[in-house]
Amino acid sequence: MTGFAFKPARAVAHLKAADPALATIIDTIGPFRMELKTSRSLFGALAEAIVYQQLSNKAAATIYGRVEALYPRARAGFTPRHILATPDEKLRGCGLSRAKVLAVRDLAQRVAGGDLPTMAEAQALADAELVERLVKVRGIGRWSAEMFLMFRLGRPDVLPLDDYSLRKAYAKAFRKRALPSPRALEKAGEKWRPYRTVASWYLWRALET
């Protein structure tokens, strides 16, 4: 398991010692098997995130594939320059909504203009600073930025408080009658620092069992 900015075994040991209730969940689920998504660039990762929003993986993959097919010579993937040179009608013809076309264009303009960090530069930024910069992109909210930190950069201490499924998972795992508010979940998650990403992954898996 590579690419994480932490040692998974150390994270699991810390969580089990810090929270006996979570330790039970961890023992039930088993080894930490979270997989990172490969990213050719920050632009590519965020463009994919925009396309996939509010769609099933199958539908989103089809649409994303159509966008890629517009640029058969782009062996390393389409770039901001490709998007900026493509008429809206062609992008819409791939299945992108009007809002997503605007979002992908805004992303392309910001990357081309140097307003966003490269993937290498993003690796060096603190979580809060990186989220602050990413959410300036149209169509990229805090949740999307946090998913980027977790599943693209492998950051150890991300707790996506606005994630409905995570709140639902917490309520189920800890036998709460109601979903916790984001503030309540944040307070509960203090004991999981500095490995809240790992705690989140286990809670998501617990929801599936």
Image (spheres, grey):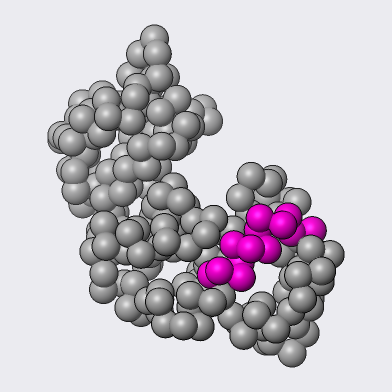
Q: Nearer the viewer, residue 76 or 86?
A: 86
Which residue is at a point 39% across and 9% down the rendered structure image?
A: 177
Decide whether the magenta segment is chiefly helix, strand or loop.
helix
Image quadrant holding the N terminus, namely: bottom left
Which residue is at a point 26% across and 50% down the rendered structure image?
A: 157
Which residue is at a point 53% across and 70% down the rendered structure image?
A: 107
Q: Residue furthest top?
A: 177
Q: Is residue 34 left or right of residue 7?
A: right
Quarter where residue 3 is shown:
bottom left
Q: Is residue 119 left or right of residue 12?
A: right
Quarter where residue 127 is shown:
bottom left
Against 2, residue 193 (above or below) is: above
Quarter where residue 17 is shown:
top left
Against 62, residue 19 (above or below) is: above
Q: Is residue 39 visible?
A: yes
**Highlighted magenta segment, given as a residue range:** 94-107
Q: Position of residue 84 (x, y in %)?
A: 65, 80
Q: Position of residue 77 (x, y in %)?
A: 64, 80
**Does 179 lie within the magenta span?**
no
Numbered marks: total:
0
